[in-house]
Amino acid sequence: MHTDFILRGLGRHAPDRILTNADLETMVETSDEWITTRTGIRQRHIVSPGEGCTDLAYGAAKMALKDAGIEADDLTHILLATYTSDYVIPQGACVLEEKLGVKGKIALDVSAACSGFLFALETARGFVALDRNAKVLVVASEVNTHRANFTDRATCVLFGDAAGAVVVTAGDPEDGPRVLDVKLGTDGGLGDLLTVKGGGSMSTYKEGEPVRDDYFIQMQGREVYKHAVRNMTGVCKEILERNNLSVDDVNVLLPHQANLRIIEAVGKKLGVPEEKVYVNVDRYGNTSAASVPLALSEARDNGFIKKGDLVLLTTFGGGFTWGAALVRF
Ligand code: ACO
């Protein structure tokens, strides 16, 4: 009996279009210097007109399926972590199922903002625990730039669009990277510090009315920063402790790529040396739920993560939501 949870394949996809800090200088009152010193972001990928969440998800899914050597039709479940699904109905996972050319799967959207990937990964582990033959596609895909207010310089410079994917099955250690543990947490009491309210049932629009500010990402940046550092650090310590591991056992720390200062602060507080911390926020910006699987796929392919490495993933997002996972490559 296969008792491990295996990441059979990894994939990623970012749209071709790039928005640089210089481009943003022409759109809002900002500067490359302000953005790079405060966030570490130099550019972000953004969708073109007509390109949506499930288009990015499709690209990442195809790559992960190819990497896994699995046909889309062999999947039992399709999970899509996103807060920027193409539509309210039908749900994005169903649209993705159709794009993959398959039917009859269990397709499900998972919403936990920037932590969505780890919440979907844990959901996938649940499906695999229920059925050892399950083959679960987990995709995280975001079109953040359609929810960024490009007249608000404090938020619009932070975000980018992308997708990342994994295929989760039961298996043995030789079958691929093993998910050793996942730990999640939430605090609904702090939800108002980071919101996208417009379009929800509490924020109604009448036909012909323009969208209001609440349609876009609104955030109290400094507060979010503090909670992000505190919770990612905390959950990383907890997951290591409950697995009888120490920070020294970690070969790679791969945090949610929100901004460089948060990433550096988490690494420093945990005592993980800089050279073990994976960073790609400079090239993609904050891609919300997509950031961790995007970085994971990239870091494996460019050799930053090597076979045998213990990788510690951690996320933080609106809700608030947070999580950590340990993966042995
Ligand atoms: N360009 C130039 N000036 C700017 C910009 C900009 N893009 N944005 C804000 N400013 C100005 C402000 O108006 C303010 O000016 P003032 O002092 O004259 O009023 C000044 O810069 C400082 O603004 P703050 O918002 O206090 O800047 P801060 O140092 O806190 O940095 C930042 C802002 C980068 C957003 C920071 O709070 C942060 O990193 N927060 C974390 C939030 C985050 O990354 N969230 C992502 C989503 S959640 C997640 O993924 C975890």
Image (cartoon, grey):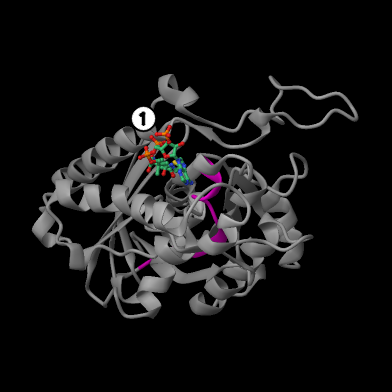
Q: Which residue is mark 1?
A: 223
* Quadrant housing the C terminus: bottom left
On the question of residue 17 being in view, the answer is: yes
Q: Is residue 203 above or below residue 19?
A: above
- Using residue 143 as the reference point, say whether residue 167 is left or right of it: left
**Residue found at x 20% / y 66%:** 276
Residue 220, how many percent across, how many down? 44, 30
Q: Magenta region, mostly helix, strand or loop?
A: strand
Residue 67, how many percent across, how many down? 50, 78
Tell me if mark 1 has few (under 14), some (14-19) or many (20+) residues whose alpha carbon lies within 10 angstroms of its own.
few
Q: Is residue 89 above or below residue 14?
A: above
**Residue found at x 26% / y 77%:** 307
Q: For residue 18, which quarter of the picture?
A: bottom right
**Residue found at x 42% / y 31%:** 320
Residue 65, how many percent across, how many down? 56, 73
Magenta span contains residue 168 = yes
Residue 83, how many percent across, how many down? 60, 43
Q: How many marks?
A: 1
Q: For residue 109, which quarter of the picture?
A: top right
Nearer-the-camera pick, 1 or 118: 118
Kind of residue at disc 1: Glu
Q: For residue 24, which quarter of the picture?
A: bottom right
Nearer-the-camera pick, 295 or 286: 286
On the question of residue 181 being in view, the answer is: no
* Quadrant housing the N terminus: bottom left
**Mark 1: C-beta under 8 Å from nearest atom of ligand 1:** no
Q: Which segment did they paint magenta?
A: 155-171
Q: Residue furthest right?
A: 208
- Using residue 180 as the reference point, say whether residue 248 is left or right of it: left
- Using residue 173 as the reference point, say whether residue 291 is left or right of it: right
Q: Secondary structure at mark 1?
A: helix
> Ligand 1 is located in which of the four quadrants?
top left
